[in-house]
Structures are given as structure tokens and as C-alpha cells.
Image: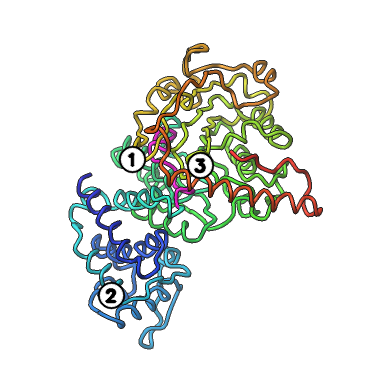
């Protein structure tokens, strides 16, 4: 991937050019999305989807203020279903409209737009096409997420973790895959790649299955408009036409998502904005804790026999009240067979402690007693903190993947490693003794922090900001409850 990495580095370095224009990192990636869409359409001979006169060459041929004004008009036009141009009505395809919806530019200086256009045009597009334009764009999203000042890491799950989860869940041709908190599409793209790698890029499948995989297999929902834009672009570059909607999964729109064979997701952390509760009338348990509400959506959204892998913070495992009720309901309706305790430092806020829950929905009409025991793998205790100096790779997950086994439902033969090992089995009786607390630990943390093991200063700053943000949300939720605007108090999150 040398050419792709080189192109990503060159594109990212351009952001420094824009500092004088007041462009943030996230604005820069969004700006690049518009420009890359136009250029990639030219490079892949798919410009037919863009109305004549509003393509890359039309932008490139202009200069100065004329170029910037044309670019502003282009963004408005391509974000409209139709527009008037020289007395004619131009129609814009739905996918193009979705990417450019409500688009606007943060660029104020014509020279900065000219610099972007010039440098994008000079890139090695032949090599980029050979290695995959989707990989190029994924690399750009990852670069943005790793830049702590961008704040983008909150919706970008580390790709080695996604690959681990997808490999263990094993999506198959003909199965539907949902991500109700889709972010930039990492889980959907990786699941698509998993199927394609095992079917000769779908050519081993029947024509009907090929069509299903490209157009119907992958779907989900994303709340943030700019993130949804990046998601659409990412899926388009990976040749996925799934129905990924802009909306709130915790609203009635989420109830309309079709039930899935597989759900893979990393829901947002924190309380619902303003301490408000999900407006889903199909939820049994009402809470302002977004992760708990997403867990309920996920196990309700699986088809009988469907399987899920979901990232959750520690508080989901131990929170009392409604948290305990949701865990109990999950374990009745599903076989919660595996919990992976993740290492610290792999998300944008280094101190956030997270886990992956793996579970399978009970067979049709079997909504009781599906969980018999929970296996826990501790990949956190006495593990170095990950960050820029120690990047997370798939190799770090290989021992867990071997212990998990080759059955996606967690039914492979497993061996308890005892109190000195990282892999333990806990019966329902064991869990009951711990007060139905799933924050199951047994290893003694004997690490001594050394200077080289301390987190990067920017990681510490990001963690402090995250805790402050969560504290503010919890204060808002508490204020609502005390003023009688909310019901039970069990939905207030304990900071992870």
C-alpha cells in the first residue's frame, strides 16, 4: 500500500496550508470529500452521474475568485435534486445529492482552493486506482481520527478491532448486516470486504446473490450530517449501495430499521443530549444512557439466531437499575457467550475503558434462558497502553481470536485458563454471586507506570475534555430529573 499511504500523507499535509483560512481538521476532510468525489468520478469514468458543466475539469479550468464562486455554486447545485442551468433543468442522481446535501465551503481565500485543486490533480491516480480508491479514503478518515484535535476519533473505531470482530462473526453471502451507529462505515465496509475475499469478489455467487450483496446486504443509520456524508462517500468507493440513513436510531426512525442477521457497531458514548430519553415507543426500558438504549435496540433488532458484536464502555456491564434490567433481558433473549475486555488507549479518549459483547439471539419464540455461561477474555490488565508510540494491530487480537474459536456463535470448544490466564468461564451462578455485575475481573494489575508507558499529553487532554463533556451531559440529565422532566434516575451514566 506504499502509493496509497504516500497519497494519504500528501493529502493530509495540505491541511496545514489551510490553517490561515481558519479550517479545522474535520472541515478539511469534509472539503476534501467534495473535491475527491469530483476527481474520482473523472478517474473512474463515472462522471455521467454529474451534470455536464459541473465536473472536475470545469472547476479546474477556472482560477481566482471565479473558481471559488463557481465551486460555491457547484456545491449548492449538486446538493439539489434539480437546478436551473442556462435555461435548462438539470437532474442530479440521489446518491450525488446525498453526498452534497446542505454542502457549503469553509474556504474563503481563492488561492487555497487553487492549491487544493492543483495538488489533488497531481496525485498518482493510476496507483491509487490499482490499490483501491476506497482504501485511500479509509486512510484519510483514519488520519483524521488519529488527530486528537479533530475530535473525529469518537466515531472512528480502530480498524484492527473492526477486523477482529468481523472475522469472528463471519458474515456470509445472503445475510443482512446492520450498523445502527454507522459513523464513517468501517464495520459495513469490513463486512463487505470479508464476503468479497471469500467469494472471488462476489464472482463465485449467483447473479441474484451478487445483486443482493451490492444493494441490500448492508444498511444502517448515522446521526451526524457531516459524518453521514463521509459514510456515503466511503461506501460508494467500496461499491456498496446499501441503505444508510441520516437519522437518530433512538428515535422512531430507528424502529423502522429492518431486523438483521448480523449487527456490528460501536454506539456513541454518553447520555442522550440534554438528558432526554430515547423517543422509541417499542423500548421496554427507558434510559438517557445512550449505550444501554443501543444495546436494547441491538438485541431487539436481531433476527432469531442472528448474531452481534458491539463495543460498549464499562458502565454498561455494571450500572444498576435499568442497566441491570437490560443486561438481564439481553441474557434471557440472547446467548451472551463472550466478553472481550479491551485495552485502554485505543479510542480518542485514552482513559475510556471498553469491551466487546458477542451474543446470539435465541431461536424463534425462545426468549428465556438463552445464556448459560459467559466467557471473558481480559486484554486489558497488564497490557501496554496503546497510542501513537504503540499502535494497535490485528496481531494483538490473535490470542483472543484463537481462544474464541471458529464458530461465530461462540460454540467452539474452549478451555478455561484459570486465575492466572486471560480466558475464563463464568456460570450464571458465578455472575449472580457478583450481584449480576458483568464487569468480571480476576487478574492482579501489577504494572508499574514508567515514563515511557505514560499516555501522550494530547491523549490526556482528550480524556479530560471527554470527562468534562460527559459530566456536563450528566448534570443536564440530573437537572431534568430533579425538575420532573424525566422519570427514573437509572439512566445517568457513570463516567467510564
Q: Earlier in the sequence, mark 1 or mark 2?
A: 2
Q: Earlier in the sequence, mark 3 or mark 2?
A: 2
Residues under numbered marks 1 and 2 in contact, where contact means CB atoms less than 8 Å apart: no
> From what the image shows, is residue 328 above or below residue 239?
above
* Crowd band around label 3 with a 10 angstrom C-alpha radius: few (<14), some (14–19), many (20+): many
Residue 153 lies in the magenta-colored region: yes
Helix, strand or loop at label 1? It is helix
* Mark 2 lies on residue: 111
* Mark 3 lies on residue: 265
Name the side, left or right, on which 443 lies relative to 191. Answer: right
Stretch of the chain drawn in magenta: 152-166
- Dominant secondary structure of the magenta stretch? helix
> From what the image shows, is residue 412 above or below residue 339?
above
Name the side, left or right, on which 304 lies relative to 122. Answer: right
For image coordinates 78% across by 54% down, the residue present is 485
Marks 3 and 2, how far apart at CA: 41 Å
Q: Earlier in the sequence, mark 1 or mark 3?
A: 1
* Mark 1 lies on residue: 196
Amino acid at each position: 500500500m506504499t502509493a496509497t499511504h504516500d497519497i494519504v500523507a500528501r493529502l493530509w499535509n495540505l491541511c496545514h496550508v489551510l490553517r490561515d483560512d481558519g479550517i479545522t481538521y474535520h472541515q478539511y476532510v469534509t472539503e476534501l470529500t467534495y473535491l475527491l468525489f469530483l476527481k474520482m468520478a473523472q478517474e473512474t469514468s463515472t462522471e455521467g452521474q454529474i451534470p455536464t458543466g459541473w465536473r472536475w475539469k470545469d472547476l479546474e479550468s477556472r482560477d481566482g475568485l471565479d473558481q471559488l464562486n463557481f465551486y460555491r455554486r457547484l456545491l449548492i447545485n449538486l446538493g439539489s435534486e434539480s437546478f436551473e442551468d442556462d435555461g435548462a433543468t438539470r437532474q442530479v442522481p440521489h446518491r450525488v445529492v446525498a453526498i452534497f446535501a446542505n454542502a457549503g465551503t469553509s474556504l474563503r481565500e481563492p488561492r487555497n482552493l487553487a492549491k487544493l485543486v492543483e495538488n489533488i490533480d497531481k496525485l498518482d491516480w493510476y496507483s491509487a486506482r490499482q490499490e483501491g480508491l476506497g482504501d485511500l479514503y479509509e486512510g484519510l478518515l483514519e488520519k483524521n481520527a488519529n488527530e486528537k484535535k479533530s475530535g473525529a476519533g469518537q466515531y472512528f473505531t480502530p480498524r484492527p478491532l473492526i477486523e477482529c470482530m468481523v472475522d469472528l462473526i463471519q458474515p456470509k453471502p445472503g445475510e443482512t448486516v446492520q450498523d445502527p451507529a454507522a459513523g464513517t462505515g468501517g464495520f459495513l465496509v469490513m463486512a463487505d470486504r470479508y464476503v468479497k475475499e471469500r467469494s472471488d469478489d462476489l464472482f463465485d455467487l449467483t447473479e441474484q446473490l451478487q445483486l443482493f450483496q451490492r444493494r441490500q446486504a448492508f444498511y444502517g443509520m448515522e446521526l451526524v450530517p457531516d459524518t453521514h456524508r463521509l459514510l456515503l462517500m466511503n461506501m460508494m468507493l467500496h461499491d456498496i449501495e446499501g441503505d444508510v440513513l441520516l437519522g437518530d436510531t433512538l428515535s422512531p426512525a430507528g424502529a423502522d430499521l429492518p431486523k438483521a442477521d448480523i449487527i456490528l457497531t460501536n454506539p456513541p458514548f454518553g447520555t442522550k443530549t440534554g438528558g432526554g430519553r430515547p423517543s422509541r415507543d417499542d423500548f421496554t426500558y427507558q434510559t438517557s444512557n445512550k449505550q444501554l438504549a443501543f444495546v436494547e435496540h441491538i438485541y431487539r433488532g436481531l433476527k432469531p439466531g442472528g448474531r452481534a458484536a458491539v463495543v460498549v464502555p464499562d458502565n454498561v456491564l455494571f450500572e444498576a437499575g435499568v442497566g441491570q434490567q437490560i443486561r438481564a433481558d439481553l441474557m434471557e433473549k440472547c446467548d451472551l457467550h463472550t466478553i472481550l475486555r479491551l485495552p485502554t488507549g485505543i479510542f480518542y479518549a485514552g482513559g475510556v475503558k471498553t469491551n466487546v459483547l458477542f451474543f446470539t439471539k435465541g431461536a424463534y419464540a425462545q426468549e428465556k434462558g438463552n445464556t448459560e455461561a459467559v466467557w471473558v477474555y481480559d486484554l486489558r490488565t497488564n497490557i501496554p497502553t496503546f497510542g501513537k508510540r504503540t499502535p494497535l494491530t490485528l496481531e494483538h487480537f490473535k490470542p483472543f481470536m484463537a481462544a474464541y474459536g471458529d464458530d461465530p456463535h461462540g460454540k467452539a470448544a474452549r478451555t478455561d485458563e484459570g486465575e492466572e490466564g486471560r480466558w475464563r468461564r463464568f456460570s450464571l451462578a458465578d455472575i449472580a454471586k457478583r450481584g449480576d455485575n458483568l464487569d468480571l475481573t480476576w487478574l492482579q494489575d501489577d504494572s508499574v507506570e514508567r515514563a515511557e508507558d505514560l499516555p501522550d499529553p494530547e491523549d490526556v487532554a482528550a480524556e479530560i475534555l471527554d470527562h468534562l463533556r460527559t459530566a456536563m451531559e450528566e448534570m443536564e440529565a440530573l437537572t431534568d430529573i430533579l425538575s420532573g422532566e424525566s422519570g427514573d434516575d437509572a439512566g445517568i451514566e457513570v463516567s467510564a
